[in-house]
């Protein structure tokens, strides 16, 4: 086992994903000084195949890296002589107020990272007053997650290749009290998760013991009692007619997750969509090389103030959150940061990730003379030449 661990660490040291190794020695989540420290702790805690699932983008991981790197090409225009002794980070989404403009993004199979999985994330979300979006392929029952979160979560929907099964998923989410359905539209087909597969080769365990061939849905609670024989999780035939059909079929608010261009944003408004999450699946959809923070301004133009816009992808600092808010996002969604914390420390690690984001954002808002989210505007930032916006 030690031999495999050494081989894994040598791989990480040579990988473009590697940073420093200091965070791997954390014994308490409070010792984490940054989100990066939680990443290092997760590397130490997880088997190579499971960490590889978190670390992987697609193809050459170009979009994965672009999501983070693009934030460095956005500068901030701080204001001075403004009373900043009280900072308000509350955000309203569809009539409910949350204490931080940070949302826990959906990610499937969270028990691969911690035995409590999605329930640990839900308890942390409740403790910190933030919203959680639950994945279609959750490994914890939606009712348990909703109860742990305090009663309100959003549900992320993969449109399966059969409408009747998709309807069952939506009805289940509605019955569990989910007020919002977030339909993922950026995964109509498969993906080439090359980094994940390379890291899996370093894992000495027999993966088929936990992941027997053809049994993917057995541990996914939303599919209990549903025959998935011949059914695909993604729907390559999904189009705007499908969006309208879903809009008409649910009482919940409908959000599209995966919109990246102005034209599609305008069509979303036209089809009665209630919100958009600008997303490229954390660099795990297609390797376009285009960061979501670059896509955000044109999507905001496309909705023309009619519906709220959220964004995910590459957010690692409070200053990244600030820049996204300045470019028109109502809030940001984060995935890997809280999953790193969960992997190392369970609920406490998720809470630490949220505390880091809160502390950094509050300090940055004060430093920039913007004590409320409403005071952060497009004039608060500027793009370096050549990036866009």
Image (cartoon, helix red, strand yellow):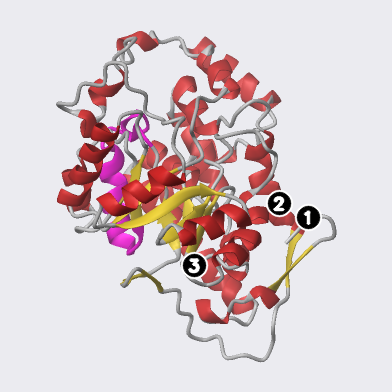
From the viewer's perspective, is residue 14 above or below residue 259? above
- Cβ atoms at labels 1 and 3 below 8 Å apart: no
Q: Nearer the viewer, residue 15 or 314?
A: 314
Q: Residues within 10 Å of mark 3 (few under 14, many from 20)?
A: many
Magenta highlight range: 108-131
Q: Nearer the viewer, residue 169 or 27?
A: 169
Query: Which dot marks residue 70?
Result: 2
The quadrant in which the C terminus is found is bottom right
Where does the image place residue 73, in percent across and percent down from the top left? 76, 57
- What residue sits right under mark 3 in the picture? 330
In screen coordinates, is 190 left or right of 159? right
In screen coordinates, is 340 left or right of 364? left
- Disc on the earlier residue, 2 or 3: 2
Q: Decide if residue 28 is in sight here.
A: no
- Cβ atoms at labels 1 and 2 below 8 Å apart: yes
- What residue sits right under mark 1 in the picture? 387
Q: Nearer the viewer, residue 23 or 140?
A: 140
Give the Cα separation between the discs numbered 2 and 3.
19 Å
Please say whether residue 190 is one of the residues in the magenta stretch: no
- Disc on the earlier residue, 1 or 2: 2
Q: Decide if residue 190 is in sight here.
A: yes
Circle 1 sits in a helix, a strand or a loop, which is it? loop
Give the Cα separation between the discs numbered 1 and 3.
22 Å
Circle 2 sits in a helix, a strand or a loop, which is it? helix
Where does the image place residue 350, in percent across and percent down from the top left? 38, 49
């Amino acid at each position: 086992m030690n031999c495999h661990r050494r081989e894994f660490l040598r791989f990480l040291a040579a990988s473009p994903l590697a940073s420093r190794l200091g965070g791997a020695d954390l014994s308490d989540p409070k010792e984490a000084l940054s989100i990066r420290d939680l990443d290092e702790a997760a590397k130490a805690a997880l088997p190579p195949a499971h960490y590889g699932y978190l670390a992987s983008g697609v193809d050459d991981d170009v979009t994965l890296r672009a999501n983070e790197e693009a934030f460095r090409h956005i500068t901030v225009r701080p204001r001075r002589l403004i009373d900043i002794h009280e900072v308000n980070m509350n955000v309203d989404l569809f009539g409910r107020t949350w204490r931080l403009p940070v949302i826990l993004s959906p990610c499937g199979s969270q028990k691969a990272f911690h035995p409590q999985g999605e329930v640990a994330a839900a308890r942390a979300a409740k403790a910190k007053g933030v919203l959680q979006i639950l994945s279609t392929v959750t490994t914890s029952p939606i009712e348990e997650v909703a109860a742990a979160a305090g009663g309100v979560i959003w549900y992320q929907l993969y449109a399966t290749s059969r409408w009747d099964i998709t309807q069952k998923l939506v009805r289940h989410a509605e019955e569990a009290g989910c007020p919002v359905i977030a339909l993922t539209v950026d995964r109509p087909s498969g993906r080439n998760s090359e980094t994940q597969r390379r890291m899996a080769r370093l894992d000495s365990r027999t993966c088929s013991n936990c992941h027997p061939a053809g049994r993917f849905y057995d541990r996914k609670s939303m599919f209990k009692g549903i025959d998935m024989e011949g059914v695909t999780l993604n729907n390559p035939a999904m189009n705007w007619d499908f969006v309208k059909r879903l809009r008409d079929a649910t009482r919940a608010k409908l959000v599209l997750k995966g919109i990246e261009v102005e034209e599609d944003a305008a069509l979303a408004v036209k089809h009665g969509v209630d919100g958009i999450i600008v997303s490229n699946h954390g660099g795990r959809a297609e390797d376009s090389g285009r960061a979501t923070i670059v896509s955000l301004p044109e999507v905001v133009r496309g909705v023309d103030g009619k519906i709220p816009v959220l964004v995910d992808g590459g957010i690692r600092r409070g200053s990244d959150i600030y820049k996204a808010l300045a470019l028109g996002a109502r809030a940001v969604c984060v995935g890997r940061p809280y999953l790193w914390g969960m992997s190392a420390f369970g609920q406490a690690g998720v809470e630490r990730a949220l505390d880091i984001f809160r502390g950094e954002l509050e300090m940055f808002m004060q430093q920039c003379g913007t004590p409320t989210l409403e005071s952060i505007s497009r004039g608060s930032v500027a793009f370096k030449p050549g990036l866009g916006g």
